[in-house]
Amino acid sequence: MSISVSIDALPADLIKDIQRDLFINTVRHAYENSLFYKNRFDDNCVHPSDIKNLEDIKKLPFTGKEDIQKDNWSLLAVPRENISEIVSTTGTTGDPVFIALTANDLERLACNEEKSFGYAGAVKGDVFNIAVTCDNLFIAGIAYYRGLTKLGASVTRLGPQNILRHLDIMKELKPTGIVAVPSFMVQLARRAEEYGVPVKELGIRKIVLIGDSIRDADLTTNALGNLIETAFGKICYSTYGITEAQLSFCECRVHHGLHSHPDLVLTEIVDEDGRLLPDGDEGELVLTPLQLEGMPLIRYRTGDVTFKLSTPCACGRNSARIGPIIGRKQQKLKVKGVTLYPRNIENAILGLQDVINYQIEAYTGDDRTDRIILRIGSHVVNGGFKSVLKDAVLAKARVTPEIEIELPEEIERRLFENGGRKAVTFKDRRQKAI
Ligand SMILES: [Zn+2]
């Protein structure tokens, strides 16, 4: 396997030629070696010989997470002894699924991150503090580790725990970059301030963020991103990663969407009926990773909603980009004709003074439409605070939810009442359509 590091600098039509060949190989490999795809293609009366160009992708059926959950190992396309590593999804949306990587898949993963960090301007000589989980079957931390070391940068692998230790190590080792989830960076800034450490003197010049988006749909920085950039400066690079497809998208220095790596993935945006949407239209992100060996995926429905940008980027790269993730498809809310996602409400209240924590709850009203309760954890209970919250949500999310102010401890209990490790900031009690 050879992976070019500069394919995205080629003219768009040459990129398409390379993608076509990789796509045809991907389809053939999936059909010939994965029982799941053999059956799925046969059931849909489609054969790899029907696939001659990129447009033929429309002939192929989608794959959903539920397909993997149903029969995980039927997707395996190599003998078991060729598996180098098994990772899993976090299980935040249903049962976790296991993804098997061969040695070549691990190398592909490293190439993916090597390129992504290159887009963020990382070079040999940089020291990156990896503040995300590097064990527990998570793919991301180790992908960053491999990509950074492949690039020639140095790493410190502290993981997500113990912010004070991060501050100590960062004062001592002076990393020039950090990889973290946005909420970690917000906490880091807060703790640094409490301990009298000026964060701008830590010497961090690049922050690569995974998880929640720090951009709004218009690609400007959202409230979460502003919290980080106010503390650290405008040095953030947003990324989007997905375990099942073993790849990530990342911003370049222009910060105008997240670049795909064209030799590693085909990107589509589809509507609720699976029809392809044009550039700029919001819909579900569908991915066909290229050059995967262990568990190939064809037209994988991610459940994440965004849009595509296919015009050349001002950075000079011709790879297709996606916008920030606007929300999860399943979490789409329709309130009095306004379509929104819980994330729109989160963005409206993040950073507001006196908001300590929150939970958004959706339920079905008597008129069968979606209703929202926004529960805010705060020590301020006066009516003025409620109207500040109401105005902020109306301005950013265009809806007026019911607002309830409770003690932060009560919200904390609600966030973890299911016994999970991850806070449930969106509780969906809506009746499912029959
Ligand atoms: Zn760019």
Image (cartoon, helix red, strand yellow):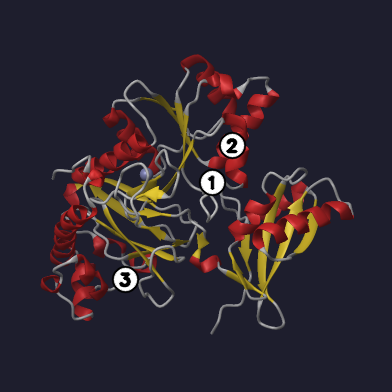
Q: Looking at the image, can residue 362 be seen?
A: yes
- State the residue in front, 348 or 168: 348
Q: Quadrant of residue 352?
A: top right
Q: Residue furthest top?
A: 172
Which residue is drawn at the image coordinates 17% and 67% (left, top)?
A: 53
**Distance in Å between CA atoms under marks 3 and 1:** 29 Å
Q: Residue under circle 3?
A: 62
Q: Is mark 1 within 8 Å of ligand 1?
A: no
In the image, which disc is placed on residue 214?
A: 1
Position of residue 262 relative to residue 20, above or below, is: above
Residue 346 point in image, percent of width and height: 64, 54
Q: Is mark 2 within 8 Å of ligand 1?
A: no
Mark 3 or 1: in front is: 1
Instruction: Give the amino acid type for the residue marked by disc 3 in the picture.
Output: Phe
Position of residue 184 relative to residue 93, above or below, is: above
> Which quarter is ligand 1 in?
top left
Q: Are marks 2 and 1 in contact (CB under 8 Å)?
A: yes
Residue 114 point in image, percent of width and height: 30, 36
Residue 8 point in image, percent of width and height: 26, 46
**Distance in Å between CA atoms under marks 2 and 1:** 9 Å
- Is residue 48 rendered to the left or right of residue 428? left
- State the residue in front, 374 or 322: 322
Which residue is drawn at the image coordinates 18% and 64% (left, top)?
A: 27
Mark 2 and mark 1 lie on one chain; the one further toward the N terminus is 1
